[in-house]
Protein backbone atom coordinates (compact mmCIF):
# COMPACT_ATOMS: atom_id res chain seq x y z
CA UNK A 1 0.00 0.00 0.00
CA UNK A 2 2.82 2.41 0.82
CA UNK A 3 4.42 1.66 -2.55
CA UNK A 4 1.19 2.66 -4.30
CA UNK A 5 0.99 5.88 -2.29
CA UNK A 6 4.65 6.73 -2.89
CA UNK A 7 4.23 6.23 -6.63
CA UNK A 8 1.25 8.59 -6.73
CA UNK A 9 3.01 11.19 -4.58
CA UNK A 10 6.15 11.13 -6.73
CA UNK A 11 4.07 11.83 -9.81
CA UNK A 12 1.92 14.39 -7.96
CA UNK A 13 -1.21 12.43 -8.82
CA UNK A 14 -4.28 11.50 -6.75
CA UNK A 15 -3.96 8.51 -4.47
CA UNK A 16 -6.07 5.81 -6.09
CA UNK A 17 -8.45 3.34 -4.47
CA UNK A 18 -10.41 0.59 -6.21
CA UNK A 19 -13.58 -0.73 -4.62
CA UNK A 20 -15.60 -3.68 -5.91
CA UNK A 21 -19.09 -2.75 -4.75
CA UNK A 22 -22.60 -1.47 -5.49
CA UNK A 23 -23.80 -4.43 -7.61
CA UNK A 24 -27.59 -3.94 -7.30
CA UNK A 25 -30.22 -3.62 -4.62
CA UNK A 26 -30.43 -7.16 -3.31
CA UNK A 27 -33.83 -8.61 -4.29
CA UNK A 28 -34.80 -9.41 -0.71
CA UNK A 29 -37.87 -7.39 0.41
CA UNK A 30 -36.95 -7.85 4.09
CA UNK A 31 -33.78 -5.88 3.38
CA UNK A 32 -34.69 -3.30 0.72
CA UNK A 33 -38.47 -3.42 0.40
CA UNK A 34 -39.74 -2.97 -3.19
CA UNK A 35 -36.86 -0.70 -4.27
CA UNK A 36 -34.64 -1.75 -7.20
CA UNK A 37 -32.71 1.49 -7.69
CA UNK A 38 -30.16 3.18 -5.39
CA UNK A 39 -31.60 5.42 -2.69
CA UNK A 40 -30.39 7.53 0.21
CA UNK A 41 -28.31 4.55 1.40
CA UNK A 42 -26.06 4.71 -1.66
CA UNK A 43 -26.04 8.51 -1.59
CA UNK A 44 -24.88 8.41 2.04
CA UNK A 45 -21.90 6.27 0.99
CA UNK A 46 -21.04 8.76 -1.77
CA UNK A 47 -21.17 11.62 0.74
CA UNK A 48 -18.81 9.65 3.00
CA UNK A 49 -16.37 9.41 0.08
CA UNK A 50 -16.62 13.19 -0.21
CA UNK A 51 -15.81 13.72 3.46
CA UNK A 52 -12.83 11.39 3.18
CA UNK A 53 -11.60 13.24 0.11
CA UNK A 54 -12.00 16.63 1.82
CA UNK A 55 -9.93 15.51 4.80
CA UNK A 56 -7.13 14.25 2.57
CA UNK A 57 -7.17 17.53 0.62
CA UNK A 58 -6.15 19.30 3.84
CA UNK A 59 -2.64 17.85 3.55
CA UNK A 60 -2.40 16.44 -0.01
CA UNK A 61 -3.79 18.60 -2.79
CA UNK A 62 -4.09 15.98 -5.56
CA UNK A 63 -6.42 14.22 -3.06
CA UNK A 64 -8.17 10.94 -3.90
CA UNK A 65 -9.38 9.12 -6.97
CA UNK A 66 -11.88 6.38 -6.21
CA UNK A 67 -12.55 3.73 -8.85
CA UNK A 68 -15.84 1.97 -8.08
CA UNK A 69 -16.13 -1.32 -9.95
CA UNK A 70 -19.71 -2.55 -10.24
CA UNK A 71 -19.81 -6.34 -10.10
CA UNK A 72 -23.56 -6.71 -10.61
CA UNK A 73 -23.24 -7.89 -14.21
CA UNK A 74 -20.86 -10.63 -13.03
CA UNK A 75 -23.18 -12.16 -10.43
CA UNK A 76 -26.75 -11.06 -11.26
CA UNK A 77 -27.73 -14.31 -13.00
CA UNK A 78 -26.66 -16.31 -9.94
CA UNK A 79 -29.24 -14.57 -7.79
CA UNK A 80 -32.07 -14.34 -10.32
CA UNK A 81 -31.72 -10.76 -11.57
CA UNK A 82 -31.68 -9.42 -15.11
CA UNK A 83 -28.80 -7.52 -16.67
CA UNK A 84 -31.27 -4.73 -17.53
CA UNK A 85 -31.95 -4.14 -13.84
CA UNK A 86 -28.20 -4.05 -13.12
CA UNK A 87 -27.64 -1.44 -15.85
CA UNK A 88 -30.49 0.70 -14.49
CA UNK A 89 -28.94 0.53 -11.02
CA UNK A 90 -25.52 1.55 -12.37
CA UNK A 91 -26.98 4.44 -14.37
CA UNK A 92 -28.93 5.76 -11.36
CA UNK A 93 -25.83 5.42 -9.18
CA UNK A 94 -23.84 7.56 -11.64
CA UNK A 95 -26.55 10.19 -11.48
CA UNK A 96 -26.25 10.28 -7.67
CA UNK A 97 -22.48 10.76 -7.97
CA UNK A 98 -23.10 13.73 -10.25
CA UNK A 99 -25.83 15.22 -8.06
CA UNK A 100 -23.52 14.95 -5.04
CA UNK A 101 -20.74 16.73 -6.94
CA UNK A 102 -18.41 13.74 -6.52
CA UNK A 103 -17.89 13.03 -10.23
CA UNK A 104 -14.53 14.83 -10.18
CA UNK A 105 -12.91 12.08 -8.10
CA UNK A 106 -15.29 9.09 -8.20
CA UNK A 107 -15.27 7.03 -11.37
CA UNK A 108 -17.30 3.92 -12.14
CA UNK A 109 -16.61 0.82 -14.21
CA UNK A 110 -18.38 -2.42 -15.05
CA UNK A 111 -16.40 -5.41 -13.81
CA UNK A 112 -17.22 -7.73 -16.72
CA UNK A 113 -15.87 -5.19 -19.22
CA UNK A 114 -12.44 -5.19 -17.59
CA UNK A 115 -12.55 -8.90 -16.67
CA UNK A 116 -13.01 -9.81 -20.35
CA UNK A 117 -9.38 -8.88 -20.91
CA UNK A 118 -8.45 -12.18 -19.26
CA UNK A 119 -11.13 -14.30 -20.91
CA UNK A 120 -8.65 -16.56 -22.75
CA UNK A 121 -6.85 -17.48 -19.50
CA UNK A 122 -10.16 -18.08 -17.76
CA UNK A 123 -11.46 -20.42 -20.47
CA UNK A 124 -8.21 -22.38 -20.42
CA UNK A 125 -8.52 -22.99 -16.67
CA UNK A 126 -12.29 -23.29 -16.27
CA UNK A 127 -12.37 -27.08 -15.83
CA UNK A 128 -9.76 -26.87 -13.08
CA UNK A 129 -11.79 -24.28 -11.17
CA UNK A 130 -14.99 -26.32 -11.52
CA UNK A 131 -13.20 -29.32 -10.00
CA UNK A 132 -11.90 -27.05 -7.23
CA UNK A 133 -15.43 -25.81 -6.56
CA UNK A 134 -16.81 -29.34 -6.27
CA UNK A 135 -14.00 -30.27 -3.91
CA UNK A 136 -14.91 -27.28 -1.75
CA UNK A 137 -18.56 -28.32 -1.79
CA UNK A 138 -17.92 -31.88 -0.61
CA UNK A 139 -15.18 -31.07 1.90
CA UNK A 140 -16.88 -28.10 3.52
CA UNK A 141 -20.52 -29.12 3.49
CA UNK A 142 -22.02 -28.78 6.95
CA UNK A 143 -19.09 -26.78 8.30
CA UNK A 144 -19.37 -23.29 9.75
CA UNK A 145 -17.95 -21.85 6.52
CA UNK A 146 -20.58 -23.66 4.42
CA UNK A 147 -23.44 -22.62 6.72
CA UNK A 148 -22.38 -18.95 6.53
CA UNK A 149 -22.25 -19.20 2.75
CA UNK A 150 -25.75 -20.75 2.71
CA UNK A 151 -27.19 -17.96 4.87
CA UNK A 152 -25.45 -15.28 2.81
CA UNK A 153 -26.85 -16.74 -0.40
CA UNK A 154 -30.40 -16.75 0.94
CA UNK A 155 -29.88 -13.08 1.82
CA UNK A 156 -28.90 -12.30 -1.77
CA UNK A 157 -31.26 -14.41 -3.88
CA UNK A 158 -34.47 -13.12 -5.44
CA UNK A 159 -37.31 -13.32 -2.89
CA UNK A 160 -39.46 -10.55 -4.35
CA UNK A 161 -42.46 -12.86 -4.70
CA UNK A 162 -42.62 -12.99 -0.89
CA UNK A 163 -44.07 -10.45 1.53
CA UNK A 164 -41.62 -8.82 3.94
CA UNK A 165 -42.55 -11.00 6.98
CA UNK A 166 -42.20 -14.20 4.94
CA UNK A 167 -38.85 -13.13 3.43
CA UNK A 168 -37.65 -12.14 6.90
CA UNK A 169 -38.59 -15.54 8.32
CA UNK A 170 -36.86 -17.37 5.48
CA UNK A 171 -33.70 -15.31 5.94
CA UNK A 172 -33.71 -16.10 9.67
CA UNK A 173 -34.20 -19.83 9.05
CA UNK A 174 -31.19 -19.88 6.73
CA UNK A 175 -28.81 -19.23 9.64
CA UNK A 176 -28.96 -22.98 10.43
CA UNK A 177 -27.61 -23.92 7.00
CA UNK A 178 -30.79 -25.63 5.85
CA UNK A 179 -34.49 -24.94 5.35
CA UNK A 180 -37.64 -26.84 6.37
CA UNK A 181 -38.78 -29.69 4.13
CA UNK A 182 -41.48 -27.62 2.41
CA UNK A 183 -38.71 -25.38 1.01
CA UNK A 184 -36.84 -28.27 -0.64
CA UNK A 185 -37.14 -26.93 -4.20
CA UNK A 186 -36.02 -23.49 -3.09
CA UNK A 187 -33.09 -25.03 -1.20
CA UNK A 188 -31.90 -26.63 -4.43
CA UNK A 189 -31.83 -23.15 -5.98
CA UNK A 190 -29.70 -21.97 -3.07
CA UNK A 191 -27.24 -24.84 -3.53
CA UNK A 192 -26.91 -24.11 -7.26
CA UNK A 193 -26.28 -20.43 -6.49
CA UNK A 194 -23.67 -21.29 -3.85
CA UNK A 195 -21.73 -23.45 -6.30
CA UNK A 196 -21.82 -20.92 -9.10
CA UNK A 197 -20.90 -18.04 -6.79
CA UNK A 198 -17.94 -19.99 -5.39
CA UNK A 199 -16.72 -20.65 -8.93
CA UNK A 200 -17.06 -17.01 -9.99
CA UNK A 201 -15.42 -15.79 -6.80
CA UNK A 202 -12.48 -18.16 -7.30
CA UNK A 203 -12.04 -16.95 -10.87
CA UNK A 204 -12.22 -13.33 -9.74
CA UNK A 205 -9.46 -13.75 -7.17
CA UNK A 206 -7.25 -15.82 -9.45
CA UNK A 207 -7.60 -13.57 -12.51
CA UNK A 208 -8.25 -10.23 -10.81
CA UNK A 209 -7.73 -7.60 -13.55
CA UNK A 210 -7.30 -4.68 -11.15
CA UNK A 211 -3.49 -4.91 -10.73
CA UNK A 212 -3.16 -4.54 -14.50
CA UNK A 213 -5.88 -1.93 -15.02
CA UNK A 214 -5.07 0.14 -11.92
CA UNK A 215 -1.37 -0.48 -11.38
CA UNK A 216 -0.84 2.17 -8.69
CA UNK A 217 -4.11 1.71 -6.83
CA UNK A 218 -4.83 0.34 -3.38
CA UNK A 219 -7.53 -2.31 -3.62
CA UNK A 220 -9.95 -1.81 -0.73
CA UNK A 221 -12.82 -3.96 0.46
CA UNK A 222 -16.11 -3.42 2.30
CA UNK A 223 -15.40 -6.29 4.72
CA UNK A 224 -12.74 -6.65 7.38
CA UNK A 225 -10.32 -9.34 6.22
CA UNK A 226 -6.68 -10.16 7.04
CA UNK A 227 -4.16 -8.14 5.04
CA UNK A 228 -6.90 -6.11 3.36
CA UNK A 229 -7.76 -2.45 3.75
CA UNK A 230 -11.45 -2.12 4.63
CA UNK A 231 -13.44 1.03 4.06
CA UNK A 232 -16.57 1.93 6.04
CA UNK A 233 -19.34 3.00 3.65
CA UNK A 234 -21.82 4.46 6.13
CA UNK A 235 -20.05 5.21 9.39
CA UNK A 236 -16.95 3.93 11.12
CA UNK A 237 -17.49 0.63 12.90
CA UNK A 238 -20.72 -0.19 11.06
CA UNK A 239 -20.54 -2.81 8.31
CA UNK A 240 -24.08 -2.35 6.94
CA UNK A 241 -23.89 -2.23 3.14
CA UNK A 242 -26.07 0.30 1.28
CA UNK A 243 -27.36 -2.22 -1.25
CA UNK A 244 -28.57 -4.47 1.59
CA UNK A 245 -30.85 -1.84 3.10
CA UNK A 246 -32.88 1.34 2.71
CA UNK A 247 -31.84 4.90 3.38
CA UNK A 248 -33.28 6.57 6.45
CA UNK A 249 -32.87 9.83 8.31
CA UNK A 250 -33.32 10.09 12.06
CA UNK A 251 -35.15 12.92 13.79
CA UNK A 252 -32.03 15.10 13.71
CA UNK A 253 -31.70 14.64 9.93
CA UNK A 254 -28.71 12.26 10.14
CA UNK A 255 -28.74 9.79 7.21
CA UNK A 256 -28.18 6.10 7.78
CA UNK A 257 -29.13 2.65 6.51
CA UNK A 258 -31.63 0.19 7.95
CA UNK A 259 -33.31 -3.06 6.98
CA UNK A 260 -36.67 -2.55 5.30
CA UNK A 261 -38.34 -4.94 7.75
CA UNK A 262 -37.61 -2.39 10.47
CA UNK A 263 -39.06 0.68 8.75
CA UNK A 264 -41.61 -0.32 6.07
CA UNK A 265 -45.06 -0.05 7.64
CA UNK A 266 -43.58 1.35 10.85
CA UNK A 267 -45.59 4.40 11.98
CA UNK A 268 -42.36 5.98 13.25
CA UNK A 269 -41.05 6.28 9.66
CA UNK A 270 -42.58 8.21 6.79
CA UNK A 271 -41.70 7.20 3.20
CA UNK A 272 -40.38 10.04 1.05
CA UNK A 273 -40.63 9.84 -2.73
CA UNK A 274 -38.81 11.53 -5.60
CA UNK A 275 -41.16 12.82 -8.29
CA UNK A 276 -42.18 10.16 -10.83
CA UNK A 277 -40.71 7.31 -8.77
CA UNK A 278 -42.96 4.55 -7.42
CA UNK A 279 -40.80 3.47 -4.47
CA UNK A 280 -39.47 5.59 -1.58
CA UNK A 281 -36.05 7.23 -1.91
CA UNK A 282 -35.78 7.38 1.89
CA UNK A 283 -37.72 6.89 5.10
CA UNK A 284 -37.93 9.86 7.43
CA UNK A 285 -38.11 9.10 11.13
CA UNK A 286 -40.86 11.26 12.60
CA UNK A 287 -41.04 9.84 16.12
CA UNK A 288 -39.06 7.66 18.50
CA UNK A 289 -39.36 3.92 18.05
CA UNK A 290 -40.33 1.74 20.99
Image (tube, rainbow, N blue to C red):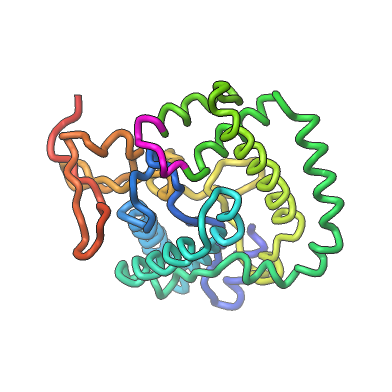
Magenta region: which residues? Answer: 159-166
For residue 235: magenta?
Answer: no
| Magenta stretch: dominant secondary structure | loop
In depth, the one of 157 and 281 nearer the eye is 157
Q: Is residue 150 left or right of residue 245?
A: right
In depth, the one of 60 and 86 nearer the eye is 86
Total marks in image: 0
Q: Is residue 268 visible?
A: yes
At horizontal 48% and vertical 71% (from top left) the residue drawn is 107
In depth, the one of 104 and 7 nearer the eye is 104
Residue 3 horizontal/vertical position (percent): 67, 63
Quadrant containing the C terminus is top left
Residue 217 horizontal/vertical position (percent): 61, 65
Residue 197 horizontal/vertical position (percent): 66, 47
Q: Is residue 163 left or right of residue 175?
A: left
Q: Is residue 3 left or right of residue 159?
A: right
At horizontal 39% and vertical 30% (from top left) the residue drawn is 166
Q: Is residue 60 visible?
A: no
Amino acid sequence: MLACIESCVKEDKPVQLTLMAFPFKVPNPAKVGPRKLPDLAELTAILRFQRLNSRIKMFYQPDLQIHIIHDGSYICDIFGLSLIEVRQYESYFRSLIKVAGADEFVRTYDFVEIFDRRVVEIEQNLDYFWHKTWRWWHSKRGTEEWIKCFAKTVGMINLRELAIPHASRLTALASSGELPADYQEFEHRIHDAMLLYHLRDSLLHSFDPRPQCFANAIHVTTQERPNRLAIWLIERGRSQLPWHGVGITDQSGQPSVALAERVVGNVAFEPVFIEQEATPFLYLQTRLTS
